[in-house]
Image (cartoon, grey):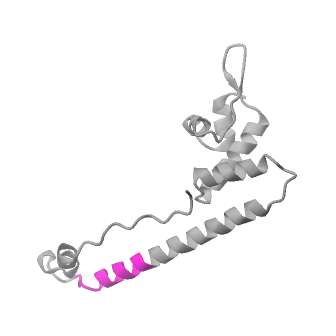
Amino acid sequence: MKIGELAKLARCTTETVRFYEKEGLMPDADRTVANYRDYSAAHLDRLRFIRNCRALDMAHDEIRALLGLTDAPTGPCGGINLLVDEHISHVDHRIAELMELRAQLIDLRSRCEAEQAVGDCGIVRELSNMDVMPSRMKHSHVG
């Protein structure tokens, strides 16, 4: 199948397919006599796998590791469990960060009443006067 058909079946764009090829997540396709890429059902399965991993917010390195494990289908799946456990831990950490952010926003929102003039708005005043916190490094469990 051609790249457009592959993309359509996987519900993505041809640019997405090319991107995953460049990232080394998709294997090279065979070429037709006319030099078009000729994708197989195995490419479609792999692309769907990658897209499902991305839908779970897995990083390319995690996906690459999973694909490496799936390329040895008779091996134990302990490595897969470990990778998913690490990803769960990463999600838990992000949830904690988002809950902290939510609490800060609720506190900020409590500083203003709708009837106030913008010049008297406690939110604007707080945003103008609060100490800027250093940007948090985004938590990542990959590399």
Identify the residue at horizontal 78%, vertical 37% (top origin). 41
Q: Is residue 125 above or below residue 65?
A: below
Q: Is residue 127 left or right of residue 55?
A: left
The secondary structure making up most of the magenta span is helix
Q: Which residues are magenta?
A: 100-114
Q: Which residue reaches farthest front?
A: 143
Residue 138 found in image quarter: bottom left
Q: Is residue 38 above or below residue 100?
A: above
Q: Which residue reaches farthest right?
A: 74
Q: Is residue 14 above or below residue 78?
A: above
Q: Is residue 118 left or right of residue 57?
A: left
Q: Is residue 96 left or right of residue 119?
A: right
Is residue 105 shown in magenta? Answer: yes
Q: Is residue 90 left or right of residue 10?
A: left
Q: Is residue 21 above or below residue 102?
A: above
Q: Which residue reaches farthest top?
A: 33
Q: Quadrant of the N terminus?
A: top right
Where residue 32 appears, as percent x and y from the top left, is 72, 18
Identify the residue at horizontal 72%, vertical 44% (top origin). 46
Where residue 119 appears, as percent x and y from the top left, is 11, 76
How many numbered badges does the structure rendering display?
0
Q: Quadrant of the C terminus?
A: bottom right
Where residue 15 appears, as percent x and y from the top left, is 55, 36
Is residue 99 shown in magenta? Answer: no
Identify the residue at horizontal 73%, vertical 40% (top origin). 44
Identify the residue at horizontal 53%, vertical 73% (top origin). 93
Q: Which residue reaches farthest left?
A: 119
Residue 124 found in image quarter: bottom left
